[in-house]
Image (spheres, rainbow, N blue to C red):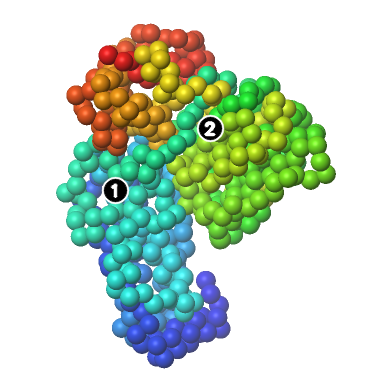
Amino acid sequence: MLNKPLRAKLVLIVLAVIVFAPAAYSQTKKIKRPKSRVGISSVDTFVQESFDLYDKVYKYDGYAEAGTPLDDEDIDVLEEALTEMTALSDSAPDIIADLDGVGVLKQGKATLQINKAKKALKYSITTAKELLLGERERKDEQEDDSEDSSEDNNTSPNDNDDNTNDTNTENETPKNISDNLEVLSKYDYIPGDKLLFFDDFSQDFVGDLPSKWNTNGSGAIVKFNTVEGNWFELKAGYRLYVIPDINELPEDYTIEFDILTSGLNNQTSSSARLFVVLSDNNMFNDGKEHYAAASLPLGQYGAFDINAFNYFNRAGGAINSGLTADIRDEIKNQPHIAISVTKKRYRLWVNEIKYIDIPRFIEELNVLNFLKFHVYGLKDGEERIFIKNLKVAEGGVDLRRKLLSEGKISTNGILFDSGSATIKAQSYGIIRQISQVLQQDAAIKLKIVGHTDADGGDDVNLKLSQSRAEAVKQALIDVYKIDANRLTSEGKGESQPIADNSTADGKAQNRRVEFIKQ
């Protein structure tokens, strides 16, 4: 709560702005509250509370536009609302996680409403701060209407804003899970095809350090009531590393993992970062003679760069750069990180956006054989970061050429939400390659075959594999405009394993999609 002298000063600021610049404010077009409920308790509560707070802030913004001064009580209400809005915004990742396993239509409707509520929250937080500080910027009606109907540049394709303006979301029914994925049609990340390491921590006990990792500090497996699966908490500290049991990386490979954060806010340090290090040793340092690393910013009060730096047989690195990036929203909404190393070239994506692409980042080949994670700058017990689904795979095979030459390919790089046929965004690089083969030769027809691991019943897995194969088929049709008559789909369930279903690695290999020329 602001003290009385500061509160009085803020009131004077707001009054001064209103008195001397009565036309300085123009409200954005009002975002319509959804009229129907989704039927998922956490989603419906999130949407309702978001719009309740939005209505408060929108009202005070209207006061400013009309020239009505804010009194002490108004400022108290805005202060309290700002605290509530910040906390509610922090809960968004947990709400999104509740959609796992929900039917496609309900998931589509829920996503639309969540995104609309997030947009309302974003407006509310920004506007409340500007009203309290007398910094509300002028926007003409044309700019407002444009803003209301377009995506925010910091929003990933999985978090699209509602683009319907005056159309009620409850009257919209997504045709397919691949709707509105235009950005993904250009996503060029291709995961490696030969699995080298995979850990989803499903084989580890909560509270333990994962069995296939080492550290010089601490860390433990945790489980949440609102987010699926086990997660590995990375502890922050000086020269504190966690190292997976990988001791040989090829010249071409990919690294993928998911991030979950908790407690990050505007007080999080600007130095808070997650480092991903490629090293020449498995000791608790960046490296002895060679290393290459990238660091992702975790701070929230400003947009901080993604850093890339390397060190090869010299007193300093040839590269030490900061790449402009505002990934604050992504960091708080369970992002997927993908890294591709192709000989000397290094690329890094956050969700579907490529932020790093350095042609000669790996200056010397065959010396960086170890992967390390390091977190720095978080407040112990308050700000937390977790990872899951670390996957390292050897790359180098062009799926397009293999499909044309051999007539068949199998990939475990097309991923789905657990227990559902919802295609994960990071899978579209592979689907894009398949579409290029079909576009190149109009005579080619493909059968798409889905396979699952052995978790769950036979009948359930058979149906799931069929649904997943059909989802890939629909993505080719809807996103890449392939003629439906050229595609068929089939599910095999768990009936044709290629690896041991009792291990996480084996299950990951068995969850695959085949493309067969007809």
- Indicate left or right for 193 with 28 as reference: right
Q: Position of residue 18 (x, y in %)?
A: 39, 86
Residue 517 in the image: above or below residue 70: above
List the residue tagged with mark 1. 112
Residue 9 is situated, as x and y percent measured from the top left of the image, at 52, 84
Asked if one can make out residue 380 in the rendered structure from this viewpoint, the answer is: no
* Residue 133 visible (yes or no): yes
Residue at (29% x, 71% y) in the render: 142
Residue at (75, 28) in percent of width and height:
281
Which disc number belongs to residue 427?
none
- Cα distance in 3D space between marks 2 and 1: 27 Å
Residue, disc 2: 256
Q: Nearer the viewer, residue 430 or 260?
A: 430
Give the quadrant of residue 103: top left
Image location of residue 461, percent across then percent down? 32, 17
Farthest residue, direction right: 315
- The mark nearer the N terminus, 2 or 1, is 1
Q: Secondary structure at mark 1?
A: helix
Point 26% across, 31% down: residue: 482
For the residue carrying disc 1, how many other residues have a C-alpha within 10 Å: few (<14), some (14-19), or many (20+)?
many
Percent position (x, y) of residue 104?
A: 26, 35
Kind of residue at disc 1: Leu
Residue placed furthest toward the bottom:
20
Left or right: 500 as drawn, with respect to 474: right
Disc 2 marks a residue whose amino acid type is: Glu
* Residue found at x 47% / y 45%: 353
Would you identify the image quadrant in which residue 372 lies? top right
Q: Tag 2: Cα neighbours inside 10 Å, few (<14), some, or many (≥20)?
A: many
Horizontal relation, residue 124 to residue 5: left or right: left
